Amino acid sequence: MRLLATLALVSALVAALAGAAEAKRAATPAELLGMLRAIQLSDPENPLGCTPLQATVSTVSPRYSAVRTIHLSRSCGDGAYLLVKQGNRWRIQTEASDWRCSVAPNGVVKDLFGSCLP
């Protein structure tokens, strides 16, 4: 009986730790709007109407977020961005094409991307 209880406890701990490994959260509507502004400012040619976003905020450091844009037409591009919040404004830290592992703390990179590559 003790073995069964121990196994149940170990299983619960493993499940809890696995959930904590990916603790990023979805961006709020206000955060998403700020991130979209940052992307638009960095690339004015990127049409807003064809850029749905998947945006997550790191829970390791909520100053960092990851945004993925999705290709819907020829005028839109696929992309992955790492953004950092400075004051109350988001700005692009790097884009996928310029990605380096050192652009953010290791815990943030793991939280948002799972590894060094977006």
Image (cartoon, helix red, strand yellow):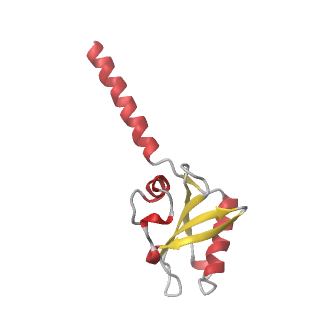
Please, which residue is most extreme toward the top here? 1
The image shows residue 112, relative to residue 9, as above or below, that is below
Q: Residue furthest right?
A: 88
Provide residue 95's location: percent of width, then percent of height: 50, 74
Instruction: Place residue 55 in its image quadrant.
Output: bottom right
Work out which residue is located at the far front of the displayed protein and give it.
102
Q: Residue at x 32, y 20 (%)?
A: 6
Q: Answer left or right for 18 relative to 44.
A: left
Residue 34 in which image quadrant? bottom right
Q: Residue at x 61, y 75 (%)?
A: 39
Left or right: residue 56 compared with residue 109: right
Q: Can you give x and y, in whole percent of width and height, for residue 56 in the image?
A: 55, 58
Task: Indicate whether 25 appears above or below 96.
Answer: above
Image quarter where the N terminus lies is top left
Q: Residue at x 52, y 51 (%)?
A: 24
Q: Which of the image's four quarters has the C terminus?
A: bottom left
Q: Is residue 46 toward the left or the right of residue 98 in the image?
A: right
Question: Where on the picture, by quarter, is residue 5?
Answer: top left
* Relative depth, front residue between 109 and 23: 109
Q: Position of residue 53 (x, y in %)?
A: 56, 68
